[in-house]
Each structure stands twice: as C-alpha cells, then as structure tokens.
Amino acid sequence: MHVEHLLGDESLGLRLLWADGVLLRREINGVTVTDLEDPARFVRPGEAVLSGLVWWTPEAGRAKAERFVSALRDADAAVLLAGEETHGSVPDELIEACSRHGIPVAGVPAHVMFRSVTETVYLQQWGELSRHDALPEYLRGRLSRLVARDAGPREIVETAFAHLADGAVAHVLTAAGRTVAVTAGADVLPASEAVGVLAGGGVTVPVDSDTASPYERWYLHLPDPAAAPPRLLHEVAALLGRSQAAQAQLRTTARRAVGELGALLAADGADAVGVEGALRACGLPAEGPYRVLAVATGARGEGLAEGALAEVLAGVGAESAAVGRLPDGTAFAVVPEATTGTVTTTGLGEVWSRVAACERTLPLHGGTGSPATDLQDLPRALAEARYALASARSTAPDASLLTDATTLTSLEALLTGVPAQVRAAYTRSVLGPLLDIRSTSATPLLETLTTFLACDGSWARTAEALHLHVNTVHYRIGRIERLTGRDLSRLTDRLDLWAALLCRADAGVTGDRRAHSSTSRAR
C-alpha cells in the first residue's frame, strides 16, 4: 500500500498538508501510534505514524516540532498522520518541519478514529481477511466476557492465541521492558532484551488506552510476524486496552486511599491510630519495616509521576507497594516488609533509567531514604525521601536522577536538598559584601576565601596557590573577617563560610548579579 492510496481513501477523509510526488508513491509497511515527543525508538522504516499531537504545545512549538519530525526522519517513517482534535488543526510549525525534513504530512479529522486508519492500512496491505483470519465469533465473545469480569492480561492473551494451530508466542510488554503477560509456555524476556525487541524485530502493536501514562503503556509483541494475522492482533490489542482501562479505574480508587495516608504522614504530629487505619485501608500491614519513595516529573509532567513510580516498583517486583499522591502533588509510595528487600538503591537504579526513557522530554526525579522500622517512623522516612527528591531535582534539574538520602554524607551533598531560594538567601546573608560586583576588591577577596578554606586554613599553601605573598593573604583574610563579621580562626565560622560558598555554587548565585539586583529592588 502506498501513501497516496491511503490519502485517497475517501472513507477516512485525510487532508494532505505537504508532500511531493515521489514521497507519495512510497510503500507503507505498517502503522505506529505514538504521542511521545521523541518517537524514534518505536518507529520502523516505512511506517505511517499516527499522533494525536498531545506532546505539542504553543510554547516552544517550533523546537518540539523539529525534534519530533527529525526523529521520524531518522527512523525513516513513510508519512505523518497528525490528529486535529487536540489543537483544532495541525500546527503550522509541524507542517514546516515536515517540509524541511521530507516527511509527508496529512491531517486526521477529529471524527476519524485512529483505529479506522490502522485497520485500513493493514486490511489493504494484506488483503481482505476471511472470518477465520480474525478472532472466531465464539472466541471473541469469550474474550469479551473475560474483560467484563476484569480478567488480567495474561488470561486474555493465553485465551486469544491458544486457538491458533501452531500456538503463537505473544508478549505484553511495557515501554520499559517489563513483561506484563505472556502466552502459556513462553519465556519471560529480560527487561533489557524486551526494550530491544520493541524497537525492532517481530511485530508490535500498541495497546490503545486513554488511561495509561507513557510510563505504563502496553505493547502486544509477537516475535514471528507471520504467527497471527494483523486484524487478530488489533482485536486482541483492543481487548487488552479495555483490560488496562479497567485496572486503571481500580488503581484510581486505591490511590485515593493512599493519598489520605500521605496527607496524614506529611502533617505535623501524625496520629498513630489514624496512620494505622490508613495503612490498612491501603492494604498495607500495620507492622514494618517499610520503605518510602517520593517521585516527581516536573510541572510539565503533572499527574504522570504516579505512573512512573508504579512502573519502577513493578520492575523490581514490589507490586504490593501502595502508590499515591501527597497534598503538594508529589507522587509517593510505601513499600511493605514483604518486598522492601528488593527496593534497594542498586535494584531501583537498574530500572530507573529504563522507565525514565519512556518519556525523554520529562526528567524523572526520585528520592528514598532509610527504612522505617514501624508506623511511627513513617513520617521520618517520608521526610527523608522528600529531601532526597529535592536533592535530585537540584543536582540534575534537566536529567533523570534517583537519590538515596543515606548517600548525602557530605556537607555539599546535604545542601543540595535545601531549596535553591533558601541557599541563595543564605549565601547573600553570610557573604554579603563579597558578592558586590560593583566593588573591584570583591572578586579577589572571594577567590582568596575559597582557596584559604580549600587549603584547610593554611596561609602558606593559600599564598602558593594564588601566587601571592603570605602577608597579602593575611591582609585579605583580615578584610574578609571585617566584612563578614566572621573569625576564620574559629571552626564554626569557617564552616558557615564554606557552606555559603557551596550554596552559592549550588544555587547558581553568580555575583552577585542576583545580590546586586535584589539590593536595587530593596532601595
């Protein structure tokens, strides 16, 4: 099937927005549905890409369009089919990017279901399938009944593929490579291998579910493309989508209870009796130990952190953990004793990068601390996890990072958990005039202070490092003491000044322009 054949199907009403004649004659090998801003890993050469453009926003729209379309070009996609429902039309920036990179683009009217486009491609590519090529009617009814009674994905795929003569092998995988379900007798793929097969090899059909975040999305994968006809795969994927949506409804109810637990733990003076009742309401034991995690995906990823956290925990085998949201919107989880042994920094770290890669446009930050011995210790464990989360966001604001509070074993590491505004204010209060960019002596004094403290207060080593006479160092240190009101012969004052210098670096206080502008505003 060629691009021009798909665009010419009047039943779909696709609107060609840009292409040239050569590109229109290109053959379509399949379809991928995605709303990832960087979809390259899931697009194979010659595929039509369907996108609802949820990833696109008017802010930085040109940059987002450039990243998305360049990924399609690198993946050698045949055509972009852009949904018009989200934004009312296909953004001009996206059309321009397609023109620059040579990717045909067409608009999908709001009333056209993506599934209709997908079925059109596969039905025309492989020809009209006879009834026995799709799910038999008796089996379709049986599967529908399974979904209606909230059957899990394993039972669905086993039932769906058992009738095939050669017993097709099928996997239901998440984007992070976790195996959700497999057909009877099939091996569970290691997560690292599963991520690879999703990117290429066999046939993969996305499971369409409006309730799944990018971190939780399922994919139906068959190692042998000829093991089952396309229409059957899409029917099974649709049934899996209904199953996932039903599970999401159950999770929503459960997460409300976990949210109530979080509100108790985050409040001052948490009531032990109330916490015990909330733990039981969440299906958690009243006895520890427990492990607490806190996770955030930033303002642009609001509401996605819970899904990311749930996927991380499922990836380490801690499905019994309770996942919810704190009053400030931070996602958190309480992991009970039965699985707390698997939730180690090493175990989590192995899964963290794979889960974060499911949505590369959002940094995934997380924090955890030492285990809570009992329910009275849970507020402390939550506070540690939140502090470690703040440290992760401060240390790597634009990259994904998981931080364990027990690793914050230096003053420099500890300070990363202090809010940037507080660090900046502390720096200005302690260093004061040394940050005044209007003073020609401020910079050499600040350099001398930094070197002096780094040299453990050695006058000789400081002079050598700065290529100064020792008397000059004495003179400068004296001026620093007068300007700051600190005595550098005292350990406590040295620590105060060193902390201020570390806060200056971590909070990005660069002269002192901040100090100067704040002084100007005060006047």
Image (cartoon, rainbow, N blue to C red):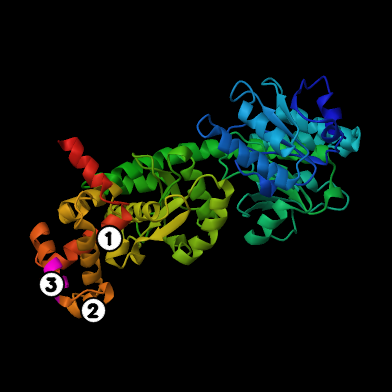
**Pointer 2: residues within 10 angstroms few (<14), some, or many (20+)?**
some
Q: Is residue 208 left or right of residue 160?
A: left
Residue 344 position, x and y percent, is 45, 64
Residue identified by numbered label 3: 474
Residue type, numbered disc 3:
His
Q: What stretch is highlighted in magenta?
A: 471-476
Of the two numbered discs 1 and 3 on the same chain, state the one appearing first in sequence. 3
C-alpha separation, residue under disc 2 versus residue under disc 1: 21 Å
Q: What element carries label 2?
A: helix
Q: Residue at coordinates 79% horizontally, 52% vertically from top-left?
A: 202
Q: Residue at coordinates 78% horizontally, 39% vertically from top-left?
A: 78
Question: Which residue is more in the foreground, 425 or 128?
Answer: 425
Q: Is mark 3 on a helix, strand or loop?
A: helix
Question: Which residue is more in the foreground, 116 or 437?
Answer: 437
C-alpha separation, residue under disc 2 versus residue under disc 3: 12 Å
Q: Residue at coordinates 49% horizontally, 41% vertically from top-left?
A: 304
Residue identified by numbered label 1: 502
Look at the image and tell me in which quarter the C terminus lies. top left
Residue identified by numbered label 2: 461
Q: Is residue 243 left or right of residue 324?
A: right
* Tag nearer the camera, 2 or 1: 2
Residue 217 position, x and y percent, is 61, 43
